[in-house]
Each structure stands twice: as structure tokens, then as C-alpha cells.
């Protein structure tokens, strides 16, 4: 089993120095090579690695839309032509068809349909392998079936109605024979669920991966249950369930691609799947990361330990108990983009620090009381841009006696574990952090902190490399990645979680609220809040919210808004908000907005802490809910119908 990860690692390392086809020549393009590809276990395992390699990455700044496509994070103006930024600004078009996963995307040279073709080839031929034990063969079949299901699902989320590929066409098929129609959205979801049900019923996946180091990225049993839960939640969501905005989007039979009447029973099915996934995770020892999971190498306060634990729920390298499934096909070069220079770091540093978090994302995080900043009856919302001096009570979050914006005070722990900001403490990630004093480390409230103003260590080392907003996505920097010297940065690569247990709990809370109402949903959302150091939703709002918000958690509509905000906070900067805002159909209102940050190229503190507009985001509805199919595809297949607005 160790060999599959060796193949994948070789593939990832070698991708930059050789073409994809050079490595993947085991994938047969002609019939005579097919038998060779499945001649023995070794060759079949290489093909299995190829199928895994076709999975779209969870995070990529220019290949998958989740990372930058909603402008939940942004790059500076020097990098605004990055494909993720162009998509986020609403400037995609059908001729360029950015982030094309339909025909020529990454990683598969032929797009995700080429990945489906590889899965079908594998499933059609795996029985030919003579030296593969039955139980191992069944496991591989389940894994590839799950890969196939997920790729279909990804295409649905990016393009809407897709062309279901149940089996690959024979090479003798005529040109007309391979020209297919797009299927109705409901039929697409039904097929994905059919594949997932087969994997679950066959029960061939292991409950637990035997080795985190050699099997990272492979599917285990809980992944099948969790993906099914996610698929059903998406199918029940407004974008795919009774979407009358697409009433005029008709297939070749002049029938709507999208059902026009909401089906409430889909939420009931989603609840069943979510609860089954929670049980499957429990059986596989998957749970929320807790303080006991943070291994303390130096004495730290409970506050710092909590921040580091929350960071590790995403970026822990070995045996992250919260990960349901990870994607090893993730380019972590962005980690250096998220890391600011700290005191003592050479000006010519290898990390760039220009992955920026706009104020619209910063505002989403709760106050220390666990309610939104505009709903807390004790939070000075109107004075949040004023200056305030770091004090003893906030010493683990903000450097004492240094001034920063008032909005950086009195926020929940996830604010400080997710974001770095000017004068905010940044524990770890540096050879001298915490600094040494006579051979002994100083207390963690004296760790290095961010100096973000013009001319300071976290500002720009050269004209094109600066943080555009004054906020860095700290949670994406692995706690064990660090500067070894002023000009040497070592990335401690971690398997990025495509789905973690907190995600599943919040999906469950969402489905239960929609199907059964708020009361039964509280335990699922409160479990996530408790881990973050917050009280439950009912008590938090009743105790700390303004009078007109106190009853918010007690209604389905109110709790829906809370769950959506909870997902934005808990999963911030992980690539989920892009997809969530579309399935909820909130993107049209949330993503027509100014993208703002501090005036970061200024040094006087009063000038620095002035909000400025960096970009103006545009979301055109209904066009931008789905991506355009590339124009070239209509030459190859005139039977295709373009998405509305493109």
C-alpha cells in the first residue's frame, strides 16, 4: 500500500519538470496498451494513482475557484490578473473560460472528463489483474468509484447540468456517437448518489487508514458517507432545488434543466445521510480537534494553546483527527504567500505575504461573546476603526503597549487563530519565536508580532510583494513551517483537508434546521462553537445580543443565517465559502461589494488605519452561479447548450 503514495509523490514532484503525458503513459490511448496497463498489480496500482491524481484540488489560487473566486481572500493589485482574482472580480468570459475543468483543466490534461474516462477504464479492466487479492481489488474498485462520483459532483457544482459518463465509449465509436447532451441537474445528482450508494453498500473501504504518512489522500469508509451527506445537502439547497431563476434554461427536449418546484423531502434525506456520516466518523475515531491534541513543546498559556490547536485543525501534518478526507494533490506553495515577515526576518525574505484577507471577511468573525459584531449589545461597532492600545488582558493576542484598530480587540478565538494583523502576536513559524533570553524562552505573550506598516518587516520587501489589506490568513500556515534563517523558509507540508469533521457537523446542523427546525440543530452547531471557546447559540444571543436579535436562534430563518455565518467563520479561507454562497444563492447580494482593507502603504498610524477600497467586486446573476463551457467545446460537440448569461 505504500507504493501508491510513492507514485503520487513522484507525480507531484515531477509535474514541474515533465509533461503530464510523460508520466501517465500507462493510461492507454490505444487498445494494444490496455493489457499492459493491467498486466500485474504493480501496473494497476500506477493506474490507481493516476485516478487519484485526477481529483480536483481543494485549494489552488489559479486552478480551482474556491480559493480566490469569491474574494474571501485577495491578492494585491500587482497580481490582479491571477485567474482566481479575475473570476472573483466577475471578469471571466466564455472565450477564455478561466479555470476550465470541462475540457483542459488541471490536473488532468483533458479536464475532469478525462479523469472520468480514466476511472471508467480502470473499472472496466481491474478484474484482469492476475496477482491482486480479492479484498484489495474490491477496495480499489470502491476507491475509484468514489473518485468518479466526486468528479461528477465537482462538475455539477462548477457547471450545473453536465454530461453523465456512465461508461467510456469504445474507440470505434463514431464522431456523432460521442456527441452527447447535457443531462438534467436532478439526473446528475441521482447518478452521483447511485455511485456513492454502491460504495457504501459494498463496504470495501477500510474504516481507518493504517498509515497517515503512506496513505494520506486515500479514501476510507467515513469519506464515502461524508461525501454522500454533502451531495444531498447541495441537492437540497436553493441553487439546485426549485431554482426558478433558470426556468428558461432548457435542454434539447425543451425541458428545464433545473426542477422548478422545491422538494422539502430532500432535506429529510440529507439529515439521514448527515447523521449516518457522523456515526461513521465516530466509528473511525474522527472528531473535532481538542486542546489535548496540541503537543506543547514549550510552556504556553491556555490562550496560545487554543490558538495553535485551532490552527492545527486544518494544518496538522500527521494524524489530524478532524480530517475526513484530504487531497494530497494540493500545491502548498501558497503557504509562503500567507506568511508575513516578522521581526528579525531578512528584508529579502522567501515568503511573500501577499495573500490578503479583506475587511468583509474580517467582519464575519464574532465578538468574544459569540455573536456578530453588529448584533452584540456591548460591542462598539461604530468605533471599530478607532485606535486602541494593547493591554494586559489582551496580551496573548495583541502586543502590549502597541496600537492597532479597535476591531482587533474583543473577538472570538477563531479570529486570532485564522488572522494575522498589524501588532497582532504570531506565535511560532520563526527560529527566534518565542525569542530566547539567556538560553530560556520568554513567555508566549512576548513572541514576535506583526509590524505591517510601510517600511516595517511585514510590509513589502519590493514593490509587487505586499499584503493588500493588512490581514494575513494565519490558519493556512502550518505551525511547524518556519524560517530557519533570515532567507531560508521551510514548509512543513500537511495534507490539506478537503473535508473535516467541523464541516460535516455544520452541514448536519443546516439540514436538521431545514427539515426539523432549530431545536434539534443546536447540538451540532454548539459542538463546533464549544470547541472554539464559545457558549451555545441560544444562550449567546439571549445574553449578549441586542434586543431585536435575542430570539434569532429560535426561528428556522434566524438559525439558518447563524449557521451560514458559522460556516463562514469556521471554514474561513479553506475554499468553502465560494461554493456555499452559490448553493445558498447569497452570492448575488454578498459579492456585489467594495473589497476593502487598511491603507497599507502608509506608515503614520492614523493614515494606515483608514479603510480604502482596493477592488469593486461584481457578481452577475444568474450568469455567475456557474462557469461558462469553453467555446471550443461547441465546435467539438454542437449538441451542447451554453450556461445562461455566457
Image (spheres, helix red, strand yellow):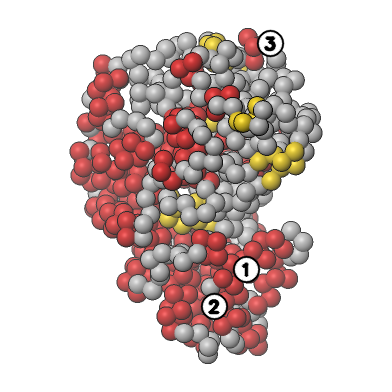
Q: In this figure, which residue is indicated by the disc labeled 1? A: 6
Horizontal arrangement in the rendering, residue 60 relative to residue 185 (left or right): right
Mark closest to the chain's N terminus, 2 or 1: 1
**Residue depicted at 39% across the width and 15% down the height:** 379
Q: Nearer the viewer, mark 3 or mark 1?
A: 1
Mark closest to the chain's N terminus, 3 or 1: 1
Separation of residues labelled 3 and 2 (CA atoms): 63 Å
Residue 290 percent across, percent down from the top left: 40, 43
**Residue depicted at 63% across the width and 43% down the height:** 481
Residue 527 percent across, percent down from the top left: 31, 41
Residue 339's mark? none
Q: In this figure, which residue is indicated by the disc labeled 3? A: 604
Residue 643 percent across, percent down from the top left: 51, 51
Q: In this figure, which residue is indicated by the disc labeled 2? A: 121
Separation of residues labelled 3 and 1 (CA atoms): 52 Å
Asked whether the viewer can see residue 442, the reply is: yes
- Residue lying farthest front? 438
Q: Badges 2 and 1: C-beta atoms under 8 Å apart?
A: no
**Residue depicted at 39% across the width and 35% down the height:** 532
Which image quadrant is residue 449 in?
top right
Horizontal arrangement in the rendering, residue 624 relative to residue 268 (left or right): right
Query: What SS does tag 3 mark?
Result: loop
Q: Nearer the viewer, residue 295 or 223?
A: 295
**Residue depicted at 52% across the width and 48% down the height:** 316
Residue 516 percent across, percent down from the top left: 20, 44
Which image quadrant is residue 28 in?
bottom right
Amino acid at each position: 500500500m505504500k507504493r501508491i503514495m510513492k507514485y503520487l509523490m513522484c507525480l507531484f514532484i515531477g509535474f514541474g519538470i515533465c509533461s503530464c503525458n510523460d508520466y501517465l503513459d500507462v493510461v492507454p490511448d490505444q487498445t494494444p496498451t490496455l493489457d499492459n496497463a493491467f498486466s500485474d498489480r504493480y501496473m494497476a496500482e500506477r493506474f490507481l494513482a493516476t485516478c487519484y491524481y485526477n481529483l480536483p484540488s481543494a485549494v489552488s489560487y489559479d486552478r480551482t475557484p474556491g480559493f480566490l473566486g469569491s474574494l474571501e481572500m485577495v491578492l494585491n493589485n500587482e497580481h490582479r490578473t491571477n485567474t482566481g482574482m479575475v473570476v472573483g472580480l466577475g471578469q471571466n468570459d466564455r472565450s477564455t473560460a478561466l479555470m476550465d475543468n470541462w475540457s483542459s483543466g488541471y490536473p488532468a490534461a483533458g479536464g475532469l472528463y478525462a479523469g472520468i474516462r480514466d476511472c471508467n477504464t480502470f473499472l472496466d479492466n481491474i478484474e484482469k489483474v492476475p496477482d491482486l487479492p480479492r479484498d484489495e481489488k474490491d477496495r480499489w474498485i470502491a476507491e475509484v468509484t468514489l473518485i468518479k462520483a466526486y468528479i461528477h459532483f465537482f462538475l455539477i457544482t462548477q457547471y450545473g447540468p453536465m454530461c453523465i459518463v456512465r461508461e467510456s465509449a469504445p474507440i470505434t465509436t463514431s464522431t456523432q456517437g460521442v456527441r452527447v447532451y447535457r443531462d438534467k441537474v436532478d439526473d446528475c445528482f441521482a447518478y452521483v448518489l447511485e455511485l456513492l450508494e454502491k460504495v457504501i453498500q459494498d463496504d470495501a473501504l477500510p474504516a481507518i487508514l493504517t498509515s497517515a504518512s503512506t496513505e494520506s489522500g486515500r479514501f476510507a469508509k467515513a469519506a464515502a458517507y461524508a461525501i454522500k451527506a454533502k451531495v444531498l445537502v447541495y441537492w437540497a439547497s436553493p441553487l439546485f432545488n426549485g431554482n426558478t431563476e433558470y426556468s428558461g434554461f432548457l435542454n434539447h427536449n425543451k425541458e428545464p434543466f433545473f426542477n422548478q418546484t422545491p422538494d422539502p423531502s430532500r432535506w429529510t434525506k440529507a439529515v439521514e445521510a448527515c447523521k449516518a456520516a457522523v456515526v461513521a466518523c465516530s466509528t473511525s475515531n474522527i472528531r473535532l480537534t481538542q486542546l489535548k491534541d496540541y503537543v506543547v513543546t514549550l510552556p504556553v498559556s491556555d490562550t496560545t494553546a487554543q490558538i495553535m490547536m485551532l490552527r492545527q485543525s486544518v494544518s496538522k501534518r500527521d494524524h489530524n483527527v478532524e480530517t475526513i478526507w484530504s487531497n494530497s494533490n494540493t500545491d502548498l506553495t501558497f503557504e509562503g504567500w500567507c506568511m508575513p515577515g516578522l521581526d528579525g526576518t531578512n528584508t529579502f525574505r522567501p515568503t511573500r505575504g501577499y495573500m490578503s484577507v479583506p475587511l468583509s471577511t474580517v467582519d464575519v468573525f464574532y465578538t468574544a461573546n459569540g455573536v456578530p459584531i453588529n448584533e452584540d449589545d456591548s460591542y462598539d461597532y461604530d468605533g471599530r476603526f478607532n485606535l486602541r492600545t494593547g493591554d494586559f488582558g489582551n496580551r496573548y493576542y495583541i502586543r502590549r503597549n502597541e496600537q492597532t484598530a479597535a476591531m482587533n480587540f474583543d473577538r472570538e478565538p477563531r479570529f486570532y487563530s485564522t488572522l494575522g494583523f498589524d501588532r497582532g502576536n504570531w506565535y511560532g513559524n520563526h527560529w527566534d519565536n518565542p525569542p530566547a533570553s539567556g538560553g530560556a524562552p520568554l513567555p508566549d505573550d512576548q513572541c514576535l508580532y506583526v509590524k505591517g506598516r510601510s517600511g516595517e518587516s511585514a510590509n513589502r520587501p519590493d514593490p509587487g510583494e505586499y499584503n493588500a489589506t493588512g490581514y494575513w490568513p494565519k490558519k493556512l500556515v502550518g505551525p511547524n513551517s518556519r524560517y530557519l534563517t533570515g532567507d531560508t523558509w521551510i514548509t512543513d507540508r500537511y495534507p490539506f483537508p478537503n473535508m473535516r469533521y467541523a464541516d460535516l457537523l455544520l452541514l448536519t446542523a443546516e439540514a436538521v434546521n431545514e427539515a426539523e427546525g432549530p431545536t434539534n440543530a443546536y447540538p451540532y452547531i454548539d459542538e463546533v462553537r464549544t470547541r472554539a471557546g464559545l457558549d451555545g447559540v441560544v444562550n449567546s444571543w439571549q445574553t449578549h445580543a441586542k434586543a431585536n436579535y435575542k430570539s434569532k436562534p429560535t426561528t428556522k430563518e434566524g438559525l439558518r443565517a447563524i449557521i451560514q455565518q458559522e460556516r463562514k467563520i469556521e471554514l474561513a479561507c479553506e475554499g468553502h465559502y465560494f461554493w456555499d454562497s452559490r448553493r445558498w444563492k447569497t452570492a448575488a447580494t454578498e459579492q456585489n461589494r467594495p473589497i476593502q482593507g487598511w491603507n497599507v502603504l502608509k506608515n503614520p498610524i492614523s493614515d494606515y488605519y483608514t479603510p480604502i477600497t482596493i477592488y469593486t467586486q461584481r457578481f452577475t446573476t444568474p450568469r455567475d452561479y456557474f462557469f461558462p463551457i469553453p467555446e471550443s467545446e461547441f465546435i467539438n460537440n454542437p449538441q451542447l447548450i451554453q450556461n445562461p448569461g455566457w
